[in-house]
Amino acid sequence: MRFRSLLVLLGAAIAATASAQTKISGELQCKSEPPTPVAIPDKPNHAFVVVKATCTWTKPFEMGGSQVKDGTETISSEMWGGKGSDHGYFAGTMAGSDTYTVKFRGTSHSKDGKSAGNEGTWSFTGGTGKLKGLKGGGKYKSGPAGADGTITTQVDGEYSLP
């Protein structure tokens, strides 16, 4: 009976280790194409905006033995005045051929028609190859857009693989 209890405890310890979350942190730079706003006539400065951006990890992290490399994001935002409610997806590639997808939602701020920063939460929705079964999520925060329109985003969170 003691031997059986030891096996159960050992199995539980291995299962807990296998599903442990690994912390990740990195920095991403994105440059967007011109946004596509559609005005909503109910009040001044109210619009839906769709934005597509190309991104590169300037401070990459590793998942599944490979470094994150680049990707594209598609953002849908409801803007009113200088504030926005954002949600979108990021489709990323690894240094190898694996890919991953992230869903995010948050708030954005603009000033004089340019991004003044944003923040929110994100979660993985899937992956391919070594990233199949990828789970996890975290937070992101961006500063204002640079002179060339590039936005730098700090990403922090955790992930697990089966």
Image (cartoon, grey):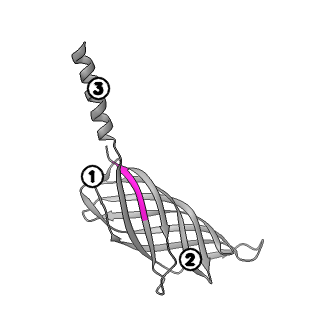
Q: Name the residue that disc number 3 marks.
A: 9
Residue density around tag 2, few if under 14, some if 14–19, many if 20 or more, within 10 Å? some
Could you say whether the residue bearing mark 2 is in a helix, strand or loop? strand
- First of labels 2, 3 by sequence position: 3
Tell me the number on the disc at residue 116.
2
User: Against 88, is 40 above or below?
Assistant: below
Give how far across and how far down residue 38 sits, in percent: 65, 75
In the displayed structure image, the side of residue 162 where residue 140 appears, left or right: right
Amino acid type of the residue tagged 3 in the rendering: Leu
Mark 1 near mark 3, Cβ–Cβ under 8 Å? no
Q: Name the residue that disc number 1 marks.
A: 130
In the displayed structure image, the side of residue 74 where residue 86 appears, left or right: right
The rendered magenta stretch, by its main secondary structure, is classed as strand
Based on the picture, tell me whether residue 131 belongs to the magenta stretch: no
Could you say whether the residue bearing mark 1 is in a helix, strand or loop? helix
Q: In this picture, which residue range is highlighted in magenta?
A: 155-160
Amino acid type of the residue tagged 1 in the rendering: Lys
Q: Which of 24 and 94 is in front in this view?
A: 24
Instruction: Give me the residue at 33% from left, 60% from top.
Output: 99
Give how far across and how far down residue 17 sits, in percent: 29, 39
Could you say whether the residue bearing mark 3 is in a helix, strand or loop? helix
Q: Can residue 22 be seen in this view?
A: yes
User: Against 23, is 32 above or below?
Assistant: below
